[in-house]
Every structure is written in C-alpha cells, then in structure tokens.
Amino acid sequence: MRDGRDRFVTAAVVLAAGPSTRLGEPKQLVMVGRETLLERSVRAAREAGCETVVVVLGAEVERILERCNLTGAVVVVNDAWEEGMASSIRVGVGAVGGADGVLLMTCDQPAVTAEHLLALMAAGEVTASAYAGRRGVPAYFPAASFPALRALRGDAGARELLREAGTVDLVGGELDVDTDADRAAAVKLFG
C-alpha cells in the first residue's frame, strides 16, 4: 500500500532463527567491527529505508535478545525453526503487514550494504542477489509474491522463486558466516 506520500512501503525480513551448528555458537552474535552480524543486517535494512524490519529468531532466542540491540525492529519468534528456512520466511512475511514489498535477508552475510538493498528494490519486481554463479538472498519480493512465500516448506528457502528472477551483483555475497574460517574472513574484510 502507498503510505500517503506517494511512495511504496518496503519491509525487511531478517532470517536469524537457525542454530549455527557448524559454527558452534550463534552466528547472530559474531562481532564484525562494533556490531553483531544481526545488528549489521538490521542497520543495513534501516539505512535502505525499510519502514519495518522484522527479525525472525528461533534457536538461542534469549541469548540473542540479551546481547543484540534490536531497538526499533519487530522481533518475532519462529517456534518451528527446526523445520528449516521456509518456516522462518512464513513467520517473517506474516509479520510485515501491508507492505508493498519485502527484502528477504539472512543475518550472516556481512557484504550486504544499504546500497545493495536499494538496488534490489529499484526494479519493483522479484530481484535476487547474484554471487558465486547463483541467485540468492538478499532478494526483493513485491507483495504479489507474498502468497508464494507463505506457501514455502522445508529448508530450501525461496530458491525456487528466484530461479527466473533478475539479479543485482553482490560482491562478496558468497561469504556467509557458517564456520570459524568464515568468521575470520568476515572480520578481516569488514571489521
């Protein structure tokens, strides 16, 4: 819906419910510079002008809430996080209200910037990030895509919905913090 000022309202959904099994501790809390990966993701979404930033938590929810400043974000808990990423997408998209579109993000990609998110939104249609020869998140979905997002199941996330999507290159997008080596690379490159 338009917000009365003749512009579209975009929300962001930051997926942060996973257990970080390969890292052995919550990746949401990994420090890059002066902020956690989760705080960094929320900041990028806010700087891109997202009206609502929904953070989907699941595993380690109490620990993450204690250590992250999520002021201004809408925090929702996915009690079915063990089902996989699709369950978090459903919960997050269900919390965006009447937005005209949503940026779907994960909390573990330190290369994501507000400028990249703005470029994704600019097309006004389903648009994926391109890195390492594939399409992925962050990705923008207009409201017409919300029913398909809410129908997702399993751990594949929105991959199938991005198969034919336009793309915006994300330099460094292949770095997601899943292991100690990834954490070291993120700190070296970004903080």
Image (cartoon, helix red, strand yellow):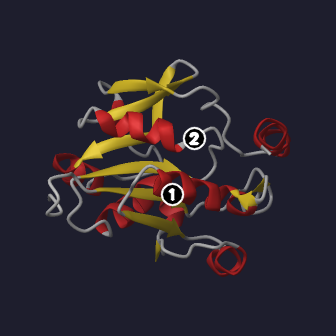
**Could you tell whether 27 is left or right of 6 in the image?**
right
Q: Which residue is mark 1?
A: 15
**Could you tell whether 84 is left or right of 188 in the image?**
left
Q: Amino acid at mark 1?
A: Leu
Neighbour class for label 1 at 10 Å: few (<14), some, many (≥20)? many
- First of labels 2, 1 by sequence position: 1
Asked if one can make out residue 78 in the rendered structure from this viewpoint, the answer is: no
Q: Secondary structure at mark 1?
A: strand
Given residues 79 and 40, the one toward you in this image is 40
CA separation, marks 2 and 1?
A: 14 Å
Q: Residue at x 35, y 62 (%)?
A: 51
Q: Amino acid at mark 2?
A: Val
Q: Where, quadrant-wise, is the C terminus in this rendering?
A: top right
Q: Position of residue 30 (x, y in %)?
A: 76, 57
Q: Secondary structure at mark 2?
A: loop
Q: Position of residue 176 (x, y in %)?
A: 66, 41
Given residues 137 and 159, the one toward you in this image is 137
Is 89 above or below relative to 136?
Answer: below
User: Quadrant location of residue 177?
Assistant: top right
Numbered circle sitting on residue 189 = none
**Could you tell whether 62 is left or right of 51 in the image?**
right
**Could you tell whether 100 is left or right of 18 in the image?**
left
Given residues 55 and 180, the one toward you in this image is 55
Numbered circle sitting on residue 112 = 2
Q: Residue at x 64, y 78 (%)?
A: 65
